[in-house]
Image (cartoon, helix red, strand yellow):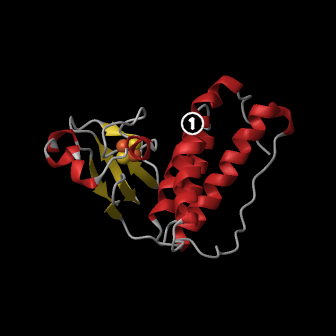
Amino acid sequence: MRRAARVEESSLEPFIDRLRDSVWRPLQDAITAPVPRIGELPHLDVTTERDDTAGDAGLWRDRLWALAQAATAQRAALPEPAIAEAAAALQDMALHLAADSSDALQERLARLAELQADLAPEIRVVNNGPYLVTNVRGVSNWLGEPLPTRPQLALCRCGASATKPLCDGSHARIGFTSRRDPSASLTNSTPTWASR
Ligand code: FES
């Protein structure tokens, strides 16, 4: 097992709100809706290596990686926007925590791409939520500058995210509705993407 770099607990702090707003919130909404949009979930076979030398923060990193794989496998199995939104946040966090090693980052990207390889490239606009961008080759901002690409992306449409261009769940907090989509009038600030 390749030993990962030690993770500083402070590096995990920004993820606490994001786990609540971008992972827990959409999944809870889908499960507790009057007509639940997520039924029985398929069995998952996701494993992760545990590095006991990495401390408590390392344990969180390993769990986030396991969660990212699980959510990605679910996203590939179910066409439910809430799962895609949660998978996008978990993929970004898990990849961010691997960014200290180019090899680890590439390994994780390849694993996530493999898990959702059967999904067609797609851009979906979520009602009252983000753009879900799936399996695209590249994403760039309105200046043409490349942005970090993940197999599943959720891009902010409400303008309130603290992690722009990525959605951080703020659209739910501010009560964003699709009728107030800033990209409808500010098209030159919207990211662009290329399909694979
Ligand atoms: S659409 Fe989610 S934070 Fe803007």
Q: Residue at x 38, y 57 (%)?
A: 132
Q: Quadrant of residue 164?
A: top left
- Tell me, yes or no, if residue 143 can be seen here: yes
On screen, residue 131 versus residue 38, left or right, reads left
> 175 or 182, which is in the foreground?
175
Residue positioned most to the front: 34
On screen, residue 2 versus residue 103, left or right, reads right
Is the shortest distance between ligand 1 and the CB of mark 1 under 8 Å? no
Question: Is 33 rendered above or below residue 160?
Answer: below
- Residue type at mark 1? Asp
On screen, residue 179 versus residue 32, left or right, reads left
Residue positioned most to the left: 185
> 44 or 145, which is in the foreground?
44
Q: Which residue is mark 1?
A: 17
Q: Residue at x 58, y 67 (%)?
A: 74
How packed mark 1 is, by other alpha carbons closer than 10 Å (few <14, some 14-19, many 20 or more), is few
> 148 or 183, which is in the foreground?
183
Q: Quadrant of residue 119?
A: bottom left
Q: Residue at x 73, y 36 (%)?
A: 4
Provide the secondary structure element on which disc 1 rests.
helix
On screen, residue 148 versus residue 112, left or right, reads left
- Tell me, yes or no, if residue 115 can be seen here: no
Question: Is 188 rendered above or below residue 77?
Answer: above
Question: Is 79 rendered above or below residue 82?
Answer: below
Q: Position of residue 135 (x, y in %)?
A: 41, 60
